[in-house]
Amino acid sequence: MKTEVIQINSQAPEKAKIEQAAGVIKKGGLVVIPTETVYGIAANMLNKKAIQRLCEVKKRPKDKPFTLHIGAKEEAEKYAVGILPFAYRLIDKFWPGPITMIFQAKENNRIGLRMPDHHVALAIIKEAGVPIVCPSANISGNLAPSTAQEVLYQLESLVDLVVDSGKTPLGMGSTIIDATQLPVKFLREGALAKEAIEQVENKKVILFVCTGNSCRSVMAQALLEKKLADANRKDVEVLSAGTMMMQGLGPTEATRELLEKEGIDVSKHRSQGINENMLKCSDLILIMEKAHEERILQLAPQVKNRLFLLKEFAKIDDTDLDIADPIGRPMEFYAQAYRLIKEAIERIVGII
């Protein structure tokens, strides 16, 4: 069998050629495709004969699992469960890109996932519409190829199709980590620097949520940021947002006045609405009222165990754990909310 070679423009992939490559994969063929790291052999994970042949071509043990390559960040949740906040942050920052993450899979085992940063690879994956594994296009133990010519030197007549899109940009394999726990375990150091991953791993994200993100959550964010700055803490990122999805509003005048007394200027703050990704990426979510919980869990039910009422952290003997919305109320009402928030922040600093 002679291996067919087609050239596809890496910046503007030709649709007909993408469909051709995807079609071969769907039918159970082996297609070598470019990624930003090295060339890989794409195969339909659901086709047992294709996977068996892939193992034979690579001379790879059948019990050694292949990494699944996906075409969109959101697809991670189709295959993985219990994704931790830091892993969502890695996905958000580095996918598409040269990092492979090992997750807990739904079938009570583990699965490696990667989203390649290459127009041709992504186009083929999306067009195929089937789960695709894509190990490096080399015989196990040999160097991974960064050009189609290097692929053919090793795999001529062993694969059905080679997609030639020129030299791969990085020319080395992805970094592989175990993302099921902290601290991160590096299984293979590759194209993405270890230090870049550790920067994300070692930072906590705390999110304050109120209704409009113009008063209570603004106070909480500003007060905690000041406490962290005073303690020279750079390992925590503080965010705030609102359940009403309001965008671009400044803080209320009363909020600005109260914070100015602490030497804090929030005049540049602009409101934002919560979104699913923001919630998933947060290690701790602190809300002002029980009513906020429903909206948050509608967007991201998996964050339930990271969700608390802020007033729970204040030393107040009170069965009502809501910090009431001061919008439209007199200044003394704002001041009361502010005192509750400040007391809670004092305790939170000691915990985080």
Image: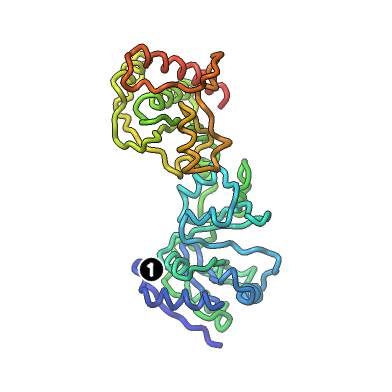
Residue shown at the point (38%, 68%) measured from the top left: 10
Q: Position of residue 40 (x, y in %)?
A: 53, 69
Q: Quadrant of the C terminus?
A: top right
Residue shown at the point (40%, 34%) measured from the top left: 241
Q: Quadrant of the N terminus?
A: bottom right
Which of the 4 quarters of the picture holds residue 208? top left
Q: Residues within 10 Å of mark 1 (few under 14, many from 20)?
A: some
Which of the 4 quarters of the picture holds residue 51? bottom right
Q: Is residue 141 above or below residue 321?
A: below
In this view, the residue in front, 347 or 114, is: 347
Residue shown at the point (41%, 14%) measured from the top left: 336
Residue at disc 1, secondary structure? loop
Q: Amino acid at mark 1?
A: Ser
Left or right, residue 352 beside residue 119: right
Extreme residue in the bottom direction: 1
Q: Is residue 94 visible?
A: yes
Task: Residue under label 1, please give it.
Answer: 10
Q: Is residue 290 above or below residue 8?
A: above
Residue shown at the point (50%, 43%) measured from the top left: 300
Q: Is residue 189 visible?
A: no
Report the coloring of the rendering.
Answer: rainbow
Q: Position of residue 16 (x, y in %)?
A: 38, 77
Q: Is residue 330 above or below residue 3?
A: above
Left or right, residue 175 beside residue 63: left
Q: Position of residue 236 (x, y in %)?
A: 49, 31
Q: Position of residue 233 (x, y in %)?
A: 50, 27
Extreme residue in the top direction: 332
